Amino acid sequence: MTVIVLLGAPGAGKGTQAQLLAERLEIPHVATGDLFRAAVRDDSPIGREARRFMERGQLVPDDITIRMLLDRLERPDAVGGAILDGFPRNRAQAQALDAALAEQESRVDLAVNIDVPSEELVERMSGRWVCEAAGHVYNESTNPPQQSGICDIDGSPLVQREDDKADTVRARLDLQLVSLREVIAHYAKAGILRTVDGRQSIDDVAGAIYDVVRGANASTAG
Ligand SMILES: [Zn+2]
């Protein structure tokens, strides 16, 4: 099993890349946001626990998120590994995930950071549009929908959130980068961090990530 954590600031294209890599490696893309939605929809015991927090507008506690992740990793389609997207988001979560995986005699094998300079992120994020139905994300310049203002996946209208405008994006990003740098440092210290230049086209970034993963597997094997 190869557990890969994909890292990147909001706007770095992490979700898109996680999906592309999952298809290429034929292992699941495990996004914590999707896990929450699925658990609530399926009305599982853990989903009910998570929903108590979500309904109050609170963050789902890390231990619940980690239990969901571990459950997901035990499903048959994840026998070859999985790509984690959206977790861990800070040092404490990274440490908790390490501890939980270690109990299962597993671990994070590789962390790939999609690196994009913050001013470029601000530019990208202020062009961000999200679909009303499911939160699918588009960008005016890097990932436009095929038809302007409409989600490719479900046809629902795309909206620009108030806080996706440049000033608020910049302030919020500064805060988020503090946590991201913690997580990056955590995996760097563990010797499993690789960095990919996120300023390239989506295809080139995907190719670079794939090369990194293949290289990491090769070095593990021999
Ligand atoms: Zn959509």
Image (cartoon, rainbow, N blue to C red):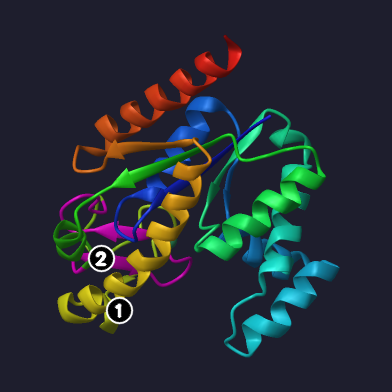
At a point 81% along the width and 46% down the height, the residue shown is: 103
Please name whichever residue, 194 or 32, is drawn nearer the observer in this view of the structure.
194
Contact? badges 2 and 1 (CB < 8 Å): yes
| Kind of residue indicated by mark 1 | Arg
Q: Which secondary structure type mostly characterizes the magenta part of the structure?
A: loop
Res 83 → quadrant: top right
List x then y, in percent, for residue 8: 37, 52
Q: Is residue 166 within the magenta segment?
A: no
> Residue most toward the top?
222
Q: Is residue 139 within the magenta segment?
A: yes
Residue highlighted by disc 1:
161
Question: Magenta span covers which residues?
Answer: 126-145
Secondary structure beneath disc 1? Answer: loop
> Residue most toward the bottom?
56
At a point 20% along the width and 50% down the height, the residue shown is: 142
Res 77 → quadrant: top right
Residue highlighted by disc 2:
128
Ligand 1 shown in quarter: bottom left
* Mark toward the start of the polypeptide (2 vs 1): 2
Q: Alpha-carbon neighbours of circle 1 within 10 Å: few (<14), some, or many (≥20)?
A: few
Q: Is residue 211 left or right of residue 145?
A: right
List x then y, in percent, for residue 133: 46, 69
At a point 53% along the width and 61% down the height, the residue shown is: 91
At a point 18% along the width and 65% down the height, the residue shown is: 122
Quick one: quadrant of the C terminus? top right
List x then y, in percent, for residue 93: 59, 62
- The total of numbered circles placed on residues is 2
Quick one: quadrant of the N terminus? top right
| Kind of residue indicated by mark 2 | Arg
Q: Is residue 219 above or below residue 203?
A: above
How many angstroms separate mark 2 from mark 1 (CA)? 8 Å
